[in-house]
Image (cartoon, rainbow, N blue to C red):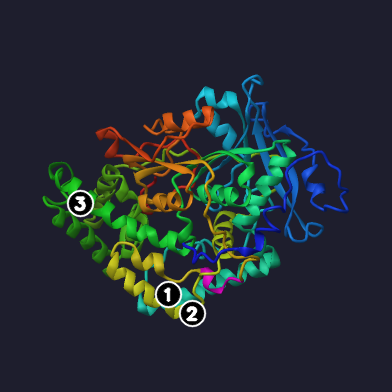
């Protein structure tokens, strides 16, 4: 997820003061048209009859275009779990699960069981569906299931079809959503966060954001540094790479993970029988890819091409034991033998609250493209650029390079309402990063640290998986101390994961968007 990083000069005078700090109101609504949003009184109600009574939800309004706050409005679904200890209360902890495209209204309920009591005593846990997502005026493009499949390998004979797909998705979204798409951006979501702050009567907000949520949090600190309290940015996006580069870094980050997997698996040939040397394990995998390219492999009713296998297995190679088990099952299928068992994902599926309106079926995919395409101006417009990049990156990163660099709908997307945010500040924050993260590789977290000069980075050496705080990681203690005392480490630091945990990512209790595995193997 990369950005060419054109600095947004627009906001120093206009945007940074766009949502004023909450102070005793002396100006009339006519003088400040944003007052109608800042002075809202949420009608809190129980989120759902199946959820605890103290888990409350409400819907507020935000302007579609902050430059014209008197114009069209969007719904913004918010939720909260209030702390029961007013004497210790510091304020609110806003939560974001990532994406882009991940709904967050349910986050307080899920995180309440994962966060320590000391943190819950300090903060009301506040969730929200970002604009365009879930119950917050969710976008939809009417995409078919096939049109939502965007991980497409590069083949010369199929490139024209891929270009047509990308154009079709962009045109469908434009036809369904119109000018609304230009304003579903990270910068506007950060402004919405500041409206939430004002509506809740807080001078500052604290924040816990995962994955894409780290970029959203970083943008907020850039736009509203004086309203940023304690920010934990977990599994971090590199602002210099938003957004094409954050897809391309998946290819770059997967190659060392794949090499690590071949070495680990070769040492356990007696168990997995995939090869006695790393080279032999590598050959086993790519022989399966080649076989599937000649004739798709039937895996539990799913016909898999070589491209399906490369795309579906990419993230699993960060989790060496799971990857070995998966490739064993794939090899059995290729040999005409039945898979041993079906896997179940350990990630809970959040149940959306019933208080909101219906969400379009393709909202997750539509919101993803809406944000990553509208956020930046650096997506190439010439399809031939994507072709040449895919050819180049297939040679550099054989597992996923062509898939990452192949054409995307952003090639035909209308420009967003403003350029991307240049992150360069000294706001205090804590960045958490696993060494082996499939979605935001280590280099990505290091990139965020470079531009957030007041932050400190905790690297979990040997850490496997996407999402750290709340998983009983060795970094949890540092994050808890920061949220409860405000004290950051004096310097960037690292902690080590126990050896057994390095072999398999834990079944994360965090309700984060997760990558699909190989079709036919659940989980």
* Residue in the foreground of this view, choosing between 367 and 2: 2
Q: CA distance from mark 2 to mark 1?
A: 7 Å
Q: Residue at x 53, y 55 (%)?
A: 423
Residue holding disc 3: 262
Q: Is residue 151 left or right of residue 232?
A: left
Q: Is residue 208 left or right of residue 274?
A: right
Tell me which segment is drawn in magenta: 409-414
Residue holding disc 2: 382
Look at the picture and state if 192 lies above or below 311: above
* Residue in the foreground of this view, choosing between 238 and 317: 238
Residue holding disc 1: 386
Q: Does any portion of residue 489 appear in the rendered image?
A: yes
Q: Is residue 354 magenta?
A: no
* Label 3: few (<14), some (14–19) or many (≥20) C-alpha neighbours in 10 Å: many
Q: Is residue 270 left or right of residue 522?
A: left
Number of numbered discs overlaid on the protein picture: 3
- Whole-percent x and y of residue 497? 30, 35
């Amino acid at each position: 997820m990369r950005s060419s990083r054109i600095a947004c000069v627009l906001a120093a005078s206009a945007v940074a003061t766009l949502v004023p700090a909450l102070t005793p109101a002396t100006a009339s609504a006519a003088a400040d048209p944003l007052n109608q949003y800042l002075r809202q009184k949420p009608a809190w109600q129980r989120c759902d009859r199946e959820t605890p009574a103290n888990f409350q939800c409400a819907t507020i309004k935000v302007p579609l275009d902050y430059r014209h706050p008197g114009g069209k409005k969007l719904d913004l679904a918010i939720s909260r779990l209030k702390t029961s200890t007013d004497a210790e209360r510091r304020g609110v902890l806003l939560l974001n699960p990532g994406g882009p495209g991940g709904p967050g209204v349910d986050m307080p309920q899920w995180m309440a069981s994962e966060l320590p009591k000391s943190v819950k005593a300090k903060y009301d846990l506040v969730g929200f569906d970002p604009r365009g997502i879930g119950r917050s005026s969710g976008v939809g493009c009417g995409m078919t299931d096939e049109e939502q499949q965007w991980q497409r390998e590069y083949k010369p004979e199929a490139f024209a079809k891929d270009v047509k797909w990308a154009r079709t998705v962009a045109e469908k979204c434009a036809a369904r959503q119109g000018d609304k798409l230009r304003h579903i951006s990270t910068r506007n979501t950060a402004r919405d966060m500041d409206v939430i702050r004002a509506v809740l009567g807080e001078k500052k907000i604290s924040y816990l954001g995962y994955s894409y949520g780290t970029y959203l949090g970083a943008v907020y600190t850039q736009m509203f540094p004086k309203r940023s309290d304690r920010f934990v940015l977990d599994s971090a996006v590199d602002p210099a790479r938003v957004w094409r580069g954050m897809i391309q870094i998946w290819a770059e980050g997967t190659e060392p993970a794949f090499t690590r997997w071949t070495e680990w698996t070769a040492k356990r040939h007696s168990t997995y029988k995939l090869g006695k040397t790393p080279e032999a394990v590598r050959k086993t995998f790519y022989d399966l890819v080649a076989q599937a390219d000649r004739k798709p492999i039937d895996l539990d009713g799913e016909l898999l091409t070589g491209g399906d296998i490369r795309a579906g297995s990419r993230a699993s190679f960060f989790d060496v034991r799971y990857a070995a088990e998966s490739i064993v099952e794939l090899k059995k299928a290729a040999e005409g033998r039945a898979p041993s068992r079906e896997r179940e994902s350990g990630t809970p599926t959040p149940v959306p609250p019933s208080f909101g309106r219906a969400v379009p079926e393709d909202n997750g995919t539509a919101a993803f493209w809406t944000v990553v395409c509208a956020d930046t101006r650096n997506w190439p417009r010439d399809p031939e650029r994507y072709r040449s990049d895919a050819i180049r990156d297939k040679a550099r990163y054989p597992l996923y390079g062509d898939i990452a660099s192949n054409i995307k709908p952003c090639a035909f997307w209308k420009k967003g309402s403003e350029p991307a945010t240049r992150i360069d500040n000294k706001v205090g924050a804590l960045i958490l990063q696993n060494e082996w993260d499939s979605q935001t590789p280590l280099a990505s977290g290091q990139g965020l640290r470079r531009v957030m000069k007041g932050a400190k980075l905790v690297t979990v050496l040997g850490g496997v998986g996407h999402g750290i705080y709340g998983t009983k990681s060795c970094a949890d203690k540092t994050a808890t101390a920061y949220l409860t005392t405000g004290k950051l480490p004096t310097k960037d630091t690292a902690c080590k994961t126990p050896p057994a945990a390095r072999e398999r990512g834990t079944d994360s209790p965090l309700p984060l968007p997760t990558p699909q595995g190989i079709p036919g193997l659940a989980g």
